Image (cartoon, rainbow, N blue to C red):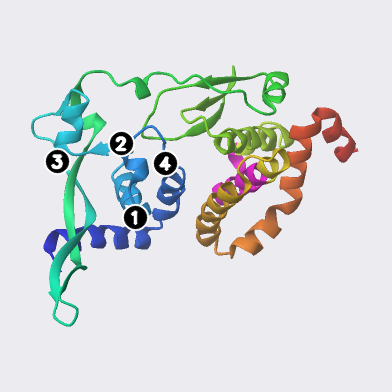
């Protein structure tokens, strides 16, 4: 095996050992549609996120958008298939076959400089389902430019609550709104919940809400499952058992988002 290819594979195995891979895969599941690497293979997207990046391109691709790699930056290597051709002696036709893999060097946007790219400006959010619920709960909602940390996040401190979205995907929005609903059920103590539990709650609630409003149910459900599966493994459960463990809480979150605080009061009573 080529040494560079072996190095890439060893890095992935190290992530398996350290239990860091589930979170990285959760990012790779929902690639930002505005960058070329969203079309890379799932494995290559995971490799990119392993390095803390989310917009990696080659020299030529950066040149096309009037940016160049800064001096001294080290590349990230992804895997690309290596195809060769040979003549089939029986049919006397030329055939293409997979001869292995080669590494391709890429650089993240943070390793480049030059022209500002439009995708990194704050995004304009589409019409978001249940946005009025966030308004009722005093949560500001803002579209932000792409970043290397998250596609969406729910934040709360002593002075304000906000949801920041760098992706217009409905499922990302509903995931963060579900975090906010969960936080409301816990009277602002969501930070005390185990990470695996609250992430599975938010993703399953988002899956239910997406299906209720008919938003890309097939594709969304597939991505929801992959996301939940990774956190379930980290939790030591199967996806099915993990979902059963959070079912009651997810039901409360969904009801709260759909019906508002009045429904919550009825459940508590």
- How packed is label 1: few (under 14 Cα within 10 Å), some, or many (20 or more)? few
Label located before the other in sequence (3 or 2): 2
Query: How far across and how far down the image is residue 160, in percent?
Result: 59, 18
Q: Is residue 147 left or right of residue 76?
A: right
Task: Let me know if residue 171 is in the magenta part.
Answer: no
Label located before the other in sequence (1 or 4): 4
Q: Residue at x 65, y 63 (%)?
A: 241
- Give the overall secondary structure of the magenta segment: helix
Displayed quadrant of residue 56? top left
Q: Nearer the viewer, mark 3 or mark 2?
A: 2
Element marked by disc 4: loop
* Residue named by callout 3: 74
In the image, the segment drawn in magenta is 191-207
Kindly check if marks 3 and 4 are in contact, taking CB atoms under 8 A apart as contact: no
Query: How far across and how far down the image is residue 188, in percent?
Result: 67, 31
Q: Is residue 93 above or below residue 263?
A: below
* Residue named by callout 2: 55
Give the distance between the C-alpha atoms of the residues marked 2 and 4, in whole angstroms.
10 Å
Camera-side residue: 90 or 81? Answer: 90
Label located before the other in sequence (2 or 1): 1
* Residue named by callout 4: 31
Give the distance between the C-alpha atoms of the residues marked 3 and 4, in whole angstroms.
23 Å
Element marked by disc 1: helix
Q: Is residue 202 above or below residue 241?
A: above
Element marked by disc 2: loop
Camera-side residue: 217 or 198? Answer: 217
Q: Residue at x 63, y 47 (%)?
A: 217
* Residue named by callout 1: 43
């Amino acid at each position: 095996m080529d040494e560079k290819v072996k190095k890439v594979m060893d890095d992935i195995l190290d992530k398996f050992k350290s239990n860091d891979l589930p979170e990285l895969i959760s990012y790779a599941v929902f690639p930002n549609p505005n960058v070329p690497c969203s079309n890379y293979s799932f494995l290559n997207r995971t490799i990119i996120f392993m390095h803390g990046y989310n917009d990696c391109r080659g020299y030529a691709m950066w040149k096309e958008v009037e940016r160049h790699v800064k001096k001294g930056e080290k590349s990230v290597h992804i895997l690309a298939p290596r195809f060769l051709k040979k003549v089939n002696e029986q049919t006397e036709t030329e055939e293409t076959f997979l001869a292995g893999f080669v590494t391709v060097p890429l650089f993240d946007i943070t390793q480049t400089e030059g022209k500002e790219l439009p995708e990194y400006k704050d995004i304009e959010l589409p019409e978001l389902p249940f946005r009025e619920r966030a308004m009722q709960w005093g949560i500001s909602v803002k579209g932000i430019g792409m970043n290397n940390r998250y596609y969406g996040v729910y934040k709360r401190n002593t002075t304000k609550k906000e949801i920041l979205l760098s992706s217009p995907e409905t499922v990302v929005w509903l995931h963060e709104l579900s975090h906010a609903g969960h936080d409301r059920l816990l009277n602002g103590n969501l930070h005390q919940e185990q990470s695996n539990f609250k992430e599975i709650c938010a993703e399953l609630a988002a899956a239910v809400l997406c299906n209720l409003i008919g938003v890309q149910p097939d594709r969304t459900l597939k991505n929801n499952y992959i996301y939940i599966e990774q956190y379930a493994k980290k939790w030591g459960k199967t996806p099915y058992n993990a979902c059963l463990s959070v079912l009651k809480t997810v039901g409360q979150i969904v009801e709260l988002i759909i019906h508002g605080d009045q429904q919550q009061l009825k459940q508590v009573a």
